[in-house]
Every structure is written in structure tokens, then in C-alpha cells.
Image: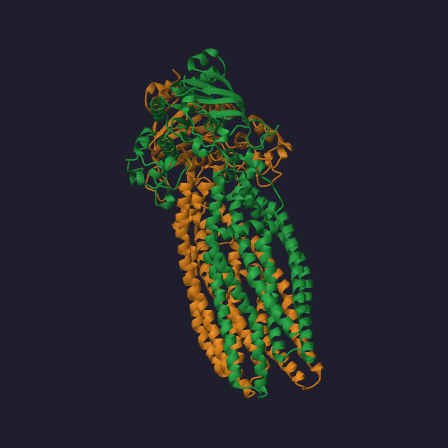
Amino acid sequence: MHFSKKLTYPRALVLPFLITPVESLLQLLSNIISLGIAPLGVLVTAYFIDTALAVVSGGGSPYRIILPLVIIGGFSVYGYMSWPLIEILNKRREIKTRLALRSPLIEKRAKLEYKHVENSDTLDLLKRVWDNPERQLSGIFDNLLQFVLLLGTVVSYAVILLINAPISGVILIVFTIPVLYIASKGGRERYNARRHTTTAQRMSQTISWFLVARDTAAERNMFGYSEYLGKKFEHYYEQFRTYCVRINAKWFAKARASSILLGLLSAIGLFIMAPAVADGSLTVGLFIALQVALFGIIGRIGGAMPRHFESFALQVEFLKDLNRFTELSEVPDAEVLPDDSFEFESLEFKNVTFSYPGTQKLVLNGLTLKMEKGKHYAFVGENGAGKTTLIKLITRLYNNYTGLILLNGRPLQDWPMSRVKACFCAVFQDFARYDITVSENVCIGKINGATPDEVDNALSLAGFNAELPDGKDTLLGKTHDANIDLSGGQWQRLAFARAIASPAPVKILDEPTAALDPVAESQVYAQFEKISRGFTTIYISHRLASAKLADTIFVLNEGKVAEYGNHDTLMERGGMYAEMFTSQQSWYE
Amino acid sequence: MQKCSQANKAGMNKKLSILRATRRIVPMVLRAVPFAAVVHALIALAWGISIGIIAPVSSRLYDALALLAIGEAQLRDVYIIAAVVTGILLFREFMNAVHAFSVRSVLYDKIRGPLSRVIHKKIKTLPAAAFEDKDTLDDIEKAGQGKDGALGMYLTLNDVLFLHGTFFVVMGIFLWSIQPILIITLVLIFVPVFFSQMVEAKLMSDLEAESAPIRRKNAHYEHCIIGTDTMKETRLFGGFFFFKNLFTTSLNLLAKKEWDTQKKITKINLLLNFVKAAGWVGILVLLFHSLMSGNITVGAFAAVFASIDTMFGFMENVMDNIRWGVTNNLGRINNFLNLLDYPTPAKSTAVPDFEEGIQLENVTFYYPKAENPAVSNVTLKIPHGETLALVGENGSGKTTLVKLLCGLYKPDDGSVMVGGIDSADTTNDALFAKTSAAFQVGQRYIFSLKENVCISEYKSEHDPLPAMRDADVNYDDTATFPQGIETILTRDYEGVELSGGQWQRVTTARGLYRHHEFIVLDEPTAAIDPLEETRIYKRFAELTQNKTAILVTHRLGSTKIADRIAVMDGGKIVEIGTHDTLLALNGKYAEMWAAQADSYA
């Protein structure tokens, strides 16, 4: 299925019939049968009791009971035997719905424009949509079905009453309406109360985390603030708790008022029916059968009705969320494979200005620069000077900039995505740790197929030397107990190996070495430079020592190139770079 | 050789029985909320009785009705009994509401808070090194869920005992009183329900054991495509189809396993439900036979008949509750109880006197379950008032040694005397009375700037501004801190988000705020710009005069402010002395110095 059209409530009801037509029809059928069985059950029970009464008061042979016994037994057998079948039907629907929905959902999410991925509101939305969407969607159909079943059962009892004791029947129908109204209000309120998580609740959860977390262990032990934060926790927790008690008290009063009301109703019904028994217009059996049925359904109306209404409210909100998600803008061809090769000539920024969506700050402010084939470039500058943003623009994660970015003289936006992917590869600061085998991890870098030799070569150039039980075929990570988790340094080398295996002519290193000490970082960069001879490289670092190696260093300040040139030129120039460098150098004099 | 810290020796995995769990948890709950617990038990009891009592009272009503139909009773008699039945029914509905309210709104949250505090208080006593043990972390993480499990178990037991139990006792008495043989009814109900639950529970737990790893993999493949840390890379390299393929394969495998299990469950349930239906018919025959032989009245016949479905329903309820509320929770409850069983070392409360300096004697330390020591056989004396710089490459053991020096970690071998006090044998309160630290990764508290600094010494009320100034926290810059020192430091609560460098300054201010005679500064400038770094180090030099201080750094240049420098390599101190002596030694330090100075040549 595809999320091209807006999923309205009616369309969501049809969805099960599109995904699982047979199962959904059977489900519908079994509900119709149940709806028929409810009133029939009352009549059969009456028949059974009346026959038993007749037999025991000397009204004929005991064998007269056999027919009602067989019928009522048949109902019971159907009830018990159909249950496992309905259960397996439900399971089948759940599984099939999951198989049908998960892939398109993931595909949609994978194609999202990157600005959505870095937006906290969208992240909240994604979290809500991702909470078992298949169950939420198939629940829409189920909820309506069960609601109709419950309502239908009440109506069918009312009809029996109408025929046999008209006044009770009218009372039941007239009073069910306000009961339903109360239930619907109660459901909505409960929904509102639940959706609204209070500040106090989140506060108490976070403080509780401070009190038990590993991250806080050192400060917690040394500063000894456990009691202090414990008091704070109790304060917020109590605030949250009393709020819940208040809300719930209101809700319970509303929801249960309806079933108490119905209880009273049934009582009235009893009182009205009794004279009918006396004058013989109502049999004892039917009286008992109706009383039992009514008393049984009261509890269900008080408990289930408001829940159905709550589910309606939840489902409408879920559909809104889902539609909001499917309407999020996509990157065309986000998922395409890179082309096999690309001839890189130059990359040019012309007066590029950029700010993150929804923010005012100009992260890039008239950036102009040019990079050419085969050279090594470094970007330095303070935190927030725009270094990492630059990479996000080059790799087309963002495109809402003004000015021009030219790849081989042609606007970057005009290149097909497969060409852009063929041109650039990157090792990011938060490089990925894929829980697949070592060689698969490397092959991601050359997704169109790397030979075993290429994998070996990339691994050895990257200095990957972890000792693993199954060599390159060892499964990595933590998702399975049998997987082997690597040290941070080895994961990093694996990320480098991925970039080395990639045939892309431009290789970008976006501070993947933040955890290393400066000397180790310099070594990594020097090694990478050696590996990437013939390629174009772009290094990003706030450590100056590693920038020294570059052919051209761009010093970014406030979204612009403040100065550029190689190390020597910049030192001679005596500008910002020279000042920063000298400051660090002064420690070593 | 493998050494374990004290905490992880407690990671005992005693098999937890329902009985043992009950013995621990029930008193815990009763201690925390005695009144609410008793009230709740009474509510369940009253509800249980009101459900059970309907059958005997109804039997009177039906008898009266039968008499009414043949004109042998007055309408008034029927009305009186009908009124009683109605009263009980309304009471039943009312108790149902009260019970639900009591569970969900009162008892649950009332117990949850105190149980969380039980965990907090226990964790307060765990040594810092315990948090480096995967098993301990597992216990801690699952203790949170285990606490909820314990709560669920308590509520389940309460209901099974007082609600369902009472119902069946009332029904049992009723059945016995009308005809003892009818007690068989309860057996006919219990047996099929019990077996069907047992089988289903077994099949489901087998399925869970098989599918949990597949589900974890499946979730990871999904993460590879859409995770915030992986998405950029997967997209750029074109890895979507690769991971989607893995994702779909594992999803299909999962579906197949689920389906196979469901088929088995269905087969068995069809069989057992046939037994249930047969039991149902059996009860009917038994009833009719009793009626025919004149042993029970028409009313009793009809009342029992009307209760059969309720009895089946309640029996299924009991089994379900025990399965979901108790059996399935036992594992997590075990983690919770395990955590509470970690030993709390008895400690002395003598306070260090830093005139005596800090002394390490042959100190060796292993991280829990580690093969090799992180610090091995270190002997070191730090005299009063000295500033010692600790340098070395990543992974050389600097941070571990510094945690041993201040007493956060206890040595596995050898001794650490902090100000004349044995660190292994002293409470945190006493040991850290005059110690402070700015850790490499400072915690980001969701409070105000002021509280973020003052949390290091929450009891004192002295002015936090000097500490902030010393750490270069520009609290009066309204662009960064719109509400000055009252600015909340998280966007989640309408505050601001700080950069890594800003946070590092706040962490340093936190360390400086706490009253100290001894302070640890662990890489305090890693996220700070080069220009400012120079300034901050110069200030440290002034602040640490006359105080014992340890400065961990990988920037060798900054060691100039130290009196002595210790060089670590492979968990050992390989060189120690002043900058000049170490350079003259021409060893590890000289080599590192040359390499770094070279990068700035």
C-alpha cells in the first residue's frame, strides 16, 4: 500500500478489507452471528428454564428437556469453539497488516527531507506514529465492530422486552440514550487527561533518572545530593499523583454513573415485569433470562462503552498524526543507489546564505569558496561557525539556501541524486555502527558491489585490526548476545574503511576523531591523507594541528570565509588562524 | 586473573519463587502504604462478596417468581426480593467503580513513588565502580520495571485472594448448601481453564524466547535506515535497499514464527475449549438431574445456571492475572530484589585531613569483569598543596587513576589513603567532605543555571557568582542566559540549550563552587576554543594555590601550571617529576611533548 491519499476515518475502515479481505469478511461475519446469538440466547435460555419448570412440576416426560438442552448446548459449543478461531483470525490480520504497512512506512520515513529529522516537533510526531501503527490502524475497524456489537446487543434485548413487556422496553431504549451520552463524554475526557502528560510527571521521571543513572554516578557519590534530589522527586511525584487522582475521580464518576443508571433501569424493568409473570403474559423462564442478560450487560456498558469512545478519540488523533506524517515533504530519489563512478572537477559556493528551518540565525552568511579536483581542504573555526552545516549542504541534506552551489559548474540541485551520491562520501562525527558483519559494514561503502580484495584492502588501510572469532564474517554490535561489540576506536576504523572502499572521488571527514587526543588525531588524518592520494578530501576539525596538512585551509567565522590559504600563508598573514595557532603553540615554548 | 568489585559479587541469581517474591514484596507494600492497602483489600472483598451473593439471592427471587406464576405467592414478596437483588446489583457496580479507582488512581501511584525511593536509596549506597558493571546496570535498569512488576504482582495477589477468592468461596458455600455434589461444578470449570492457560503460557514463552532476538535485529535494521545517527550515512552511501532487504527478511521470519505458534495454540485451544463446552453441558445435566430428583429448588437451578458463565469468566480471569501479573513478572521482580540485596558496606565516618596528603600504596584496579587491570600496582604520594598533572594517551588509565585518587573507586589491591583516611572504608559523606571535582563529562541537570552550579553543595547558601566567574560562565550575557542565573538549562522546560563548551564551563563552576581542599579537574577545556583555553588555565593556576589539585589533560602544554607531572601508560605511572626533569629524562613524556610541540611548530 502507499500513502498517497489522505487516510480519513472511513478510508481507515475500508483498509482491512484491502489488506486482508478474506479475514476481515470472516471477522464481520462472526460479529453478525454473535449479534444474532445474543437475543436468541435469551430466548433459548427461557425455553430451557420453562421446559425444566414444566417437567419438574409434572408437566410431562423428563426427555422433553433433551431438545432445549441440545440447542443451548449447541450455542455454548459454538461460543467456546469459535473463540480460538476468531483469535487466530485476528492474529492473521495483525501479521498481514504489519507486513503490508511496515515497509511503506519505513520507506516514507527514509525519504523524508532531512530538516524533518532534525526537528524536535517532527520527532515527537514520528514517535507517536511509530507506536505500533499496524495495531492502531486495524484497531479502528475492531473498535467500531465491537461498539456496534455491544449497541446491537442492547437494542436486541430492548426489542425482546418491547414484544413481551412493552413498557420496560420503552424505558430501556429511552434511558440508554443519556447513558451513551455520558459514556461518550467520559471517554473524551479520559482521552484528554491521558494525552496530557504534565510537567510534574516528566520532572519526576528525569530526577528519578538522575538518582539511578550511570552517567551521574560520579557526581552523585561525590556531591552526595541523593537526599536533596530525592525530596525534589517526592515533591514533583506527589504533585503529579494528586493531579491524576483528581482527573480520574471525575472520569470514574462519569463513566460509572452510566452503569449505575442502567442498573436502576433494569430494576425498574424487574418491577414492571413481575406483574406480567403473575398474569402469565411473561413466562418465568423469559423473566430470568432477561434479568440475567440485562444484569450482565450493565457492567459491560459501564466499562466498555467509555473505552470505545476513548478509542474513537485516540484513533481520530492517530489518523491526523499519520496524515501529517505522510504529508511531510520528501527528497526525490532519497533512496537511490549511487552511480558507479563520477568525474569530479570542482565544487563552488557562491554567496551561499543559510539558516536552519524555523530559526533566525544565519549559520552561513554569504559563503563563497571553490574546491578543485585532487586537492586536500580543511575547514577550521569555532563551534557554530558553520563547518558541519557546510557538509550538510554539500551532501544535499538541506537545500533551502540562497546563493549557488555548483558541482562541476552546474547547480548541485540539478544533478540527479544518484550522481551526487556517486561524487561524495563522508565519515561523520556520529558515524554509524551497523550491527552486521565486518565485511558488510565495509561493503555499504561500495554498495554496488565490492570484491573481497577491495574489502580486505580497505580494512587494512584503515588499520582495522580487531581480533574476531569469525574474521570478516563476525556479526558486530549488541543486538544479539553472539554478536561482538567493538571498541570505539575499532568502530571508527571500520567507518574509515567504509569511506575508503567507496569509489566516490570526494571524501569528507567531519570530525570523526573528536574522542581522540590531538596527536592521535593528527596521525589518523595523516594516514587518511596517504590513503586518499588522487582523491579530493575535505577535513573538518576544530584542532589546528590536523589542518596543517591541507593544501588549502578555510577559516570560517560567522558564516563566511574569514581567510584561506595554506598553513604558511595564513601564519604569515597574522590573522585569526595565526592567533589561534600561536595561542596553542605558546604552551610548548 | 579476574577480580570483581564488591557490588557485583552480590549479582546473585537465586531462582525466584512466587512465594519468595511474595514474602519480600507484601511487607514492603504494607510498610509503604498500610492504610491504603487494607482499604483496598476490603474493597476487593466487598466487591467479591457482592458478585457471589447474587446467585443465592437470585435463587430466592426465582423461587418466589415460580410461585407467583402459579398463584401461590404475593406480588409484594417478589417486589421485596427484587429490591434486595437490585440493591446488591447497584452495590456491585459501585464497588466495581471504587475498586478500579482504588487500583488505578490511588494504590498504584501511591506505591510506585515509595518503591522508586527504595531504589534511589539503595543506589545511593552503591560504589561508583558498580556502574561500570554490565550486570549491575542491567539490574538497575530492570529494577525500574521490576518495581512496576512487583506492584502488579501485589495488586494481582490482592485481587486473586480477596476478589476472586471470595467469589469462589461464596459460590462454593452456596453450591454446597443446596447440594454438596454440585461442588464438582467448580472442578469442571477449573480443570480445562487451567490446562489451556498452562499450554498457552508455555507456547508463548517459547515463542518469545525464539523471537526476541529476531525482533531486536529487525528493530536494528529499521534503525539503520531511519535512526538519527545512521540516516545520513545510509542515505549518502545508498544503503536503503540493503537494509530494507534485511528488515523485510527478519520481519517475515518473525511473522512465520508467530503464525506457527498461533496455529499450535489454536489447535490446543480448540480441543480444550471443547472440553470446556462439555463441562458446561455436564454442569447443566447435573443441575437438571438434581432438579428432577427434587434435591434443589427451581430457583437454585436457575440461579446456578445463570452463574455458570460468570464462574468460567472469573476462573479465566484468575489464571490470566496470575500469568500476566505474577509469572511473567518474576524475572523483572528478581532484578528488583537483586538490586536491593547488593551489600551496603559498613563504613567509618572519619573526615580526611589533607595536611596528610594523598597516598597510594601498590594500587591495582580492575573494571568489573575485566581481564586486565585498568590501573596496576601504582604507588604515589601527593603532598599537601601540590598540583599534580596527569598525562597520557587515550586509554592509559588517567581517568581511572583520578577516580581512585579521590576515592570514588576503591582499589582491588593495595590501599588509597585520602588525607589519612582509608578510602575503601569510609562513607561517601565523610570521604568527600573536603573534596570536589569537575568531571570530564559533567551532568546536564534540567534545573536553573544557579542550581546546576550549587548542586555540588546544596546545603550551603554561599554566593555562586565567584565560581561562575572563575569558570568563565557569562551569566550576565542575556543572549545566552535570558533570565540570568535563574535561566533553566533545557529547552524541555522553556529554558535554553547550551553548547558543549558552555556546559563544560558550568561543570567547572560546579566543581569550584563546592568547598574543597582537594580538587580534581578532568580535561576541563576539551570543548573550549584555543584562545579561551589559555586564559582558563592561567586562572586555574591561581585558584589551586595552597590546595591539593589534580589536573587531567592530554594537552601537555597546560601541565606548566602543575608542580609535578605524572605520565601514565598502560595503567602504570611510567614517569613522574617536574616538566624539566621529565624532558631531561628523554622518555615517554619527552616523546609526547615533541610530538605535540611538533604539530605546533
Which image quadrant: the N terminus of chain B? top right
Which image quadrant: the C terminus of chain B? top left
Q: Nearer the viewer, residue A191 or B328?
A: B328
Residue A573 at what x, y percent from top left? 33, 20
Count of marks, rendered view:
0
Q: Nearer the viewer, residue A123 or B572?
A: B572
Q: Is residue B321 left or right of residue B106?
A: right
Residue B131 at what x, y percent from top left? 51, 36
- Relative height, residue A122 to residue B529 (above, below): below
- Relative height, residue A383 to residue B259 (above, below): above
Q: Which chain is green?
A: B
Residue located at (50% from left, 30% from top): B425
Residue A192 visible in the picture: no
Residue B477 at what x, y percent from top left? 28, 35
- Relative height, residue B491 to residue B456 (above, below): below
Residue sticking out furthest to the top: B584
Residue B438 visible in the picture: yes
Q: Is residue B105 left or right of residue A578?
A: right
Residue B391 at what x, y percent from top left? 46, 22
Give the color of chain A as drawn.
Answer: orange
The colour scheme used to paint the residues is: by chain
Residue located at (65% from left, 63% from top): B190
